[in-house]
């Protein structure tokens, strides 16, 4: 094989590699974002003009998220939050409207203690989407019902549904990034999830 043919072959291989990098990189980035954000990826694509704009937004959320000093909760703090949640659930029987407001406040307090920003619902959604994307739709639905309740358009069944949605986000916030717990404590959490 002549030197010119070898050089031509090397150049052709390099061109193919460069093309593959440009083709595969966006696909790999898309897969990474889909894996990280789950259903929130599709939600962002629906809200934006293009997939590229949605992916840019999600990458910006990751960047903002990395700037926060998020911390796990101590076992004592987790237990305290679980007791507060049990009280809110018990309150639902006699005062569902008040219990929903308390559930929303408790979720916000938990977010603050973990180090998430708590100013503004949209900002909360954006930051929570990075680590809690799989339960974010629960938060949206609970928030929507809470807003309808404030104007008197939510039934007791709607409020019960909101409570279930708040519990999903609450549990995710409490358990994800939390300090490791013993197996018997995890079993107590699973039992708590089935109550309501």
Image: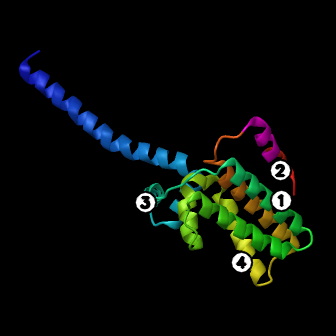
Q: Residue 60: which disc?
A: 3
Q: Can you name the residue that lies furthest to the left here? A: 3
What secondary structure is marked by label 1? helix
Residue 112 position, x and y percent, is 60, 64
Q: Which residue is drawn at 42% across and 46% down?
A: 29
Name the residue nearer the viewer: 146 or 42.
146
Q: Estimate the spatial distance between the alpha carbons at disc 4 and disc 1, rounded to whole Å.
A: 23 Å
Name the residue nearer the viewer: 4 or 194.
194
Asked whether residue 142 is in view, the answer is no
What secondary structure is marked by label 2? helix
Residue position for label 4: 147
Mark 4 or mark 1: which is in front?
1
Circles 2, 4 touching at the beta carbon (< 8 Å): no
Residue position for label 1: 86
Q: Can you name the residue that lies furthest to the bottom here? A: 151
Disc tally is 4
Q: Which residues are the magenta region?
A: 182-189
Q: Is residue 187 magenta?
A: yes
97, above or below 166, in the image: below
Q: Residue at x 41, y 59 (%)?
A: 56
Mark 2 or mark 4: which is in front?
2
What secondary structure is marked by label 3? helix
Q: Does the magenta stretch include residue 166?
A: no
Mark 3 or mark 1: which is in front?
1
Circles 4, 3 touching at the beta carbon (< 8 Å): no
Q: Residue 192: which disc?
A: 2
Q: Which residue is drawn at 51% across and 60% down?
A: 45
- Viewed as shown, does residue 136 lie left or right of 90? left
């Amino acid at each position: 094989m002549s030197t010119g043919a070898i050089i031509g072959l090397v150049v052709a291989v390099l061109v193919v590699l460069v093309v593959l990098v440009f083709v595969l990189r966006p696909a790999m980035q898309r897969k990474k974002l889909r894996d990280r954000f789950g259903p929130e990826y599709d939600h962002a694509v629906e809200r934006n003009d293009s997939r590229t704009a949605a992916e840019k937004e999600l990458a910006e959320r990751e960047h903002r998220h990395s700037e926060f000093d998020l911390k796990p909760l101590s076992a004592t703090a987790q237990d305290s939050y679980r007791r507060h949640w049990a009280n809110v659930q018990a309150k639902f029987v006699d005062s569902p409207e008040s219990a929903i407001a308390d559930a929303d406040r408790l979720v916000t307090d938990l977010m603050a203690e973990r180090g998430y920003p708590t100013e503004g619902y949209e900002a909360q959604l954006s930051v929570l989407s990075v680590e809690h994307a799989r339960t974010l739709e629960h938060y949206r639905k609970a928030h929507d019902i809470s807003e309808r309740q404030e104007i008197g358009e939510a039934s007791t069944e709607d409020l019960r549904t909101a409570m279930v949605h708040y519990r999903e986000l609450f549990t995710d916030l409490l358990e994800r990034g939390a300090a490791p717990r013993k197996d018997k404590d995890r079993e107590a959490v699973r039992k708590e999830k089935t109550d309501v």
